[in-house]
Image (spheres, rainbow, N blue to C red):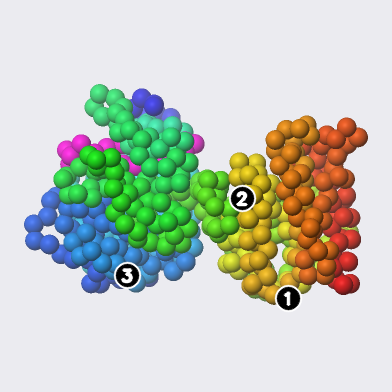
């Protein structure tokens, strides 16, 4: 842990603050779902939408910008009209910004660093605080104990916290590891009425809280590597926040207690259909949480990546698909993504123009994709153009992260059957996984060879075909040809030309069949 300081430090760039007149820029007003109680404490615990002093389970659906809350005082799901932008343009948050003892739905706009909250009279702008594009993660909480939530951000590159005080002063403190090895989870863990700086360590699921005498550990709770998302709150109403987690794949909530932990039940859409409304959500959107979950989760279960690069690419791909620009569609991971694209240096551009441009070829590859990621993409718009032929390159990232051959085969099979179900007229060409690393006896090389062997039994027909380009990428000793795969994984200029020849011959045979 880093040492902390409560004063503004020289050389630290504070987030920009811009206060303008209040105005409603966001759609929807929540009227009715949130219950009013008589006596309320000054300030509210995280996600206490009904004001009973206990945190509620709440989720935000990015596809519709709709909020769903299960108040602890009511016990039933209460949907609300949309508030915020759809997609991943806004980070869903909550806070008691007016000090009435109930938290309000709020959002942090990724592109601008603006904050908006929804009160009884509608949406209002709280100001601009924090760097855009999630260089700063929003972490609102009542840090000074005045009963109102403060605007605050966590700069993940440095582990710094910037907290805006009521008079406009900015407190800068350092706590937690940089580069999102730690996720910020501020809450009032000691019951003194003030939110504590705290972090959740991704690799170990350990919770750390900054106390007066230094760092305190609350122990480990939840699954490591973001199988579980931290959602701390005062779920029992004792005035102290407890470590709690939301399981992304099942939408189940768990809270730590004296007995070790208990389930609060399932609430929300599984597989990242919904995001938990918590201070950790901004960090999840900044990270490739889909990668972590897909590494550890079932390979035949679709999962949506949350990192901004993948979201942006998928959005642009779907727009092209719906415009009918995908007669021959290349789908998959970085092997496809890096083929002749300007963003990756135009490596292989000449072979793309020679072999795929004449067919109207379109590249929908995304670096780092696994079978789970691709399953979600083909189920959510990538096939809207109903391509004549799909060329698949997928599975290497599953094997490379320890999924194993059997699980990877299941995942690839699920991708194939999903494509056949969504677009029955589409022909599918499955490409074998390229060899890596150099030594033929290394377990990963052995697994790749076994995986490719499993698919050689696919009929060489006109509807579904398998082609294994691996032999062409080996040198005389059986090692990986660095002439064709300069980094040992991805084709270079010559490698893409060889791969283009192999794939184009198979496509021509399928179209002629």
Q: Residue at x 64, y 72 (%)?
A: 421
Instruction: Say the numbered circle drawn on residue 425.
Output: 1
Quickly name the residue at label 2: 407
Q: Which residue is mark 3?
A: 79
Residue 8 is left or right of residue 289, and the answer is: left
Q: Quadrant of residue 34?
A: bottom left
The answer to which of marks 3 and 1 sits earlier in the sequence is 3
Q: Position of residue 380 (x, y in %)?
A: 58, 67
Residue 237 visible in the displayed image: yes
Residue at 77 percent across and 66 percent down: it is 464
Magenta-highlighted residues:
179-197
Q: CA distance from mark 3 to mark 1?
A: 39 Å
Badge 2 marks a residue whose secondary structure is helix
Q: Which of the two residues, 36 or 249, is positioned nearer the viewer here? A: 249
Query: Is 147 left or right of 215, judged from the image as shown?
Result: left
Of labels 3 and 2, earlier in sequence is 3
Q: Quadrant of the N terminus?
A: top left
Determine crowd level at label 2: few under 14, some 14-19, many 20+ residues with C-alpha closer than 10 A.
some
């Amino acid at each position: 842990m880093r040492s902390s300081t409560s004063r503004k430090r020289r050389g630290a760039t504070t987030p920009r603050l811009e206060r303008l007149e209040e105005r409603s820029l966001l759609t929807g007003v929540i009227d009715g779902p949130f219950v009013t109680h008589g006596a309320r404490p000054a300030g509210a615990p995280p996600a206490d939408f009904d004001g009973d002093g206990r945190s509620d389970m709440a989720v935000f659906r990015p596809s519709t910008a709709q909020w769903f809350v299960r108040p602890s005082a009511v016990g039933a799901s209460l949907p609300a009209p949309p508030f915020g932008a759809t997609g991943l343009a806004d980070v869903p948050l909550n806070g008691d910004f007016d000090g009435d003892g109930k938290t309000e739905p709020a959002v942090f706009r990724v592109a601008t660093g603006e904050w908006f909250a929804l009160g009884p009279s509608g949406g209002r702008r709280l100001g601009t605080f924090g760097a855009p594009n999630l260089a700063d993660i929003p972490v609102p909480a009542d840090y000074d104990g005045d009963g109102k939530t403060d605007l605050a951000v966590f700069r993940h590159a440095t582990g710094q916290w910037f907290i805006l005080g009521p008079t406009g002063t900015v407190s800068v403190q350092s706590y937690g590891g940089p580069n999102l090895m730690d996720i910020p989870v501020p809450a009032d863990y000691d019951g003194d009425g003030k939110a504590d700086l705290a972090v959740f360590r991704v690799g170990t699921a350990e919770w750390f809280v900054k106390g007066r005498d230094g760092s305190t550990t609350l122990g480990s709770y939840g699954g490591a590597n973001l199988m579980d998302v931290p959602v701390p709150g005062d779920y029992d109403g004792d005035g102290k926040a407890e470590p709690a987690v939301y399981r992304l794949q099942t939408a189940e909530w768990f809270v730590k207690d004296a007995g070790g932990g208990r389930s609060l039940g399932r609430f929300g859409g599984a597989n990242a259909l919904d995001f938990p409304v918590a201070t950790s959500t901004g960090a999840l959107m900044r990270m490739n949480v889909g990668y972590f979950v897909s590494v550890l989760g079932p390979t035949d279960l679709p999962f949506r990546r949350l990192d901004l690069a993948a979201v942006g690419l998928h959005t642009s791909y779907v727009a092209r698909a719906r415009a009918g620009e995908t007669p021959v569609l290349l789908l998959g991971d970085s092997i496809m993504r890096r083929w002749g694209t300007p963003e990756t240096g135009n490596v292989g551009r000449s072979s793309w123009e020679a072999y795929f441009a004449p067919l109207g070829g379109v590249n929908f590859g995304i670096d780092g994709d696994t079978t789970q990621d691709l399953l979600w993409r083909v189920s959510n718009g990538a096939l809207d153009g109903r391509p004549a032929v799909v060329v698949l390159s997928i599975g290497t990232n599953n094997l490379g992260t320890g999924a194993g051959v059997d699980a990877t085969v299941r995942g690839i099979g699920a991708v194939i059957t999903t494509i056949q179900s969504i677009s029955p007229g589409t022909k599918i060409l499955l490409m074998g996984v390229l060899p890596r690393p150099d030594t033929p006896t290394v377990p990963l090389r052995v697994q790749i060879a076994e995986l490719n062997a499993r698919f050689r039994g696919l009929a060489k027909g006109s509807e579904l075909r398998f082609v294994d380009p691996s032999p062409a990428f080996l040198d005389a000793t059986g090692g990986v040809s660095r002439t064709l795969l300069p980094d040992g994984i991805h084709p270079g200029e010559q490698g893409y030309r060889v791969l283009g020849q192999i794939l184009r011959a198979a496509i021509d045979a399928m179209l002629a069949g």
